[in-house]
Amino acid sequence: MDASPKRRWYQFSLGTLLAVMLAISLLLGVCGRIAFLLRQAEFHDQERMSCIDSFLEMHKGYGSPRFLDGKSPEEMFGRDGAARIREMIARSLMHQAVAKNYRQAVYRPWTVVDDSPPLEPFLKKALPNPTAPAPNPPQP
């Protein structure tokens, strides 16, 4: 009879088990984070399209599908309507920027993405505000 014990197939140390579990959990965490970032980018794309659809729905009653037909928003929709249009366009631009940030974060999943940036910078980009004073041109 052989006195040495028979070695089992799946014999491993506790440290090896912990290292394997750590590697698997990190891999699953990164994959889950990437899936979350892509879902958020898709959500903000849908919100952007919702803003554009509401703008087009508001514009539909005014004839031409071209953008404002060369008229100012105040001429087309009145002061309140123009403010609403500026806000819709600004929200659309904001959602576009946030979706872009989420898509860029896919390549660096540890990046924190600001989900609700302030709307003011996007309002300035949306349409010029006719009530705001014109900027002074630089003096030569």
Image (cartoon, rainbow, N blue to C red):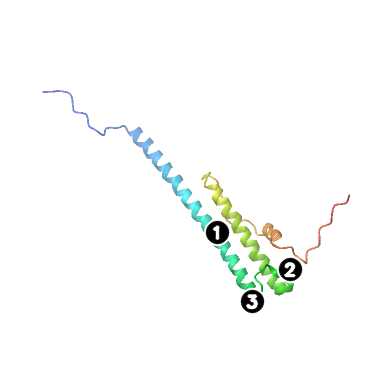
Look at label 3 and name its amino acid: Gly
Q: Position of residue 68 (x, y in %)?
A: 70, 69
Q: Position of residue 32 (x, y in %)?
A: 44, 49
Q: Element under label 1?
A: helix
Which of the marked residues, 2 or 3, is nearer the chain's N terminus?
3
Residue labelled with disc 3: 61
Quadrant where the N terminus sits is: top left
Residue lying farthest right? 140
- Answer above or below: position of 54 versus 115: below
| Number of marks present in the image shown | 3
Look at label 2 and name its amino acid: Gly
Marks 2 and 1 sit apart, C-alpha to C-alpha, by 28 Å
Residue labelled with disc 2: 70
Residue labelled with disc 1: 45
Marks 3 and 1 sit apart, C-alpha to C-alpha, by 26 Å
Which of the marked residues, 3 or 1, is nearer the chain's N terminus?
1
- Is label 3 in contact with label 1 (beta carbons under 8 Å)? no
- Answer above or below: position of 124 versus 81: above
Q: Identify which residue, 110 or 52, lies in the foreground.
A: 52
* Relative side of 51 to 82, left or right: left
Q: Identify which residue, 125 or 66, lies in the foreground.
A: 66
Look at label 1 and name its amino acid: Asp
Q: Residues within 10 Å of mark 3 (few under 14, many from 20)?
A: few
Which of the marked residues, 2 or 1, is nearer the chain's N terminus?
1
Picture quadrant where residue 97 is located: bottom right
- What's the residue at 40%, 38% (across, down)? 23
Q: Element under label 2?
A: helix
Q: Position of residue 138 (x, y in %)?
A: 85, 52
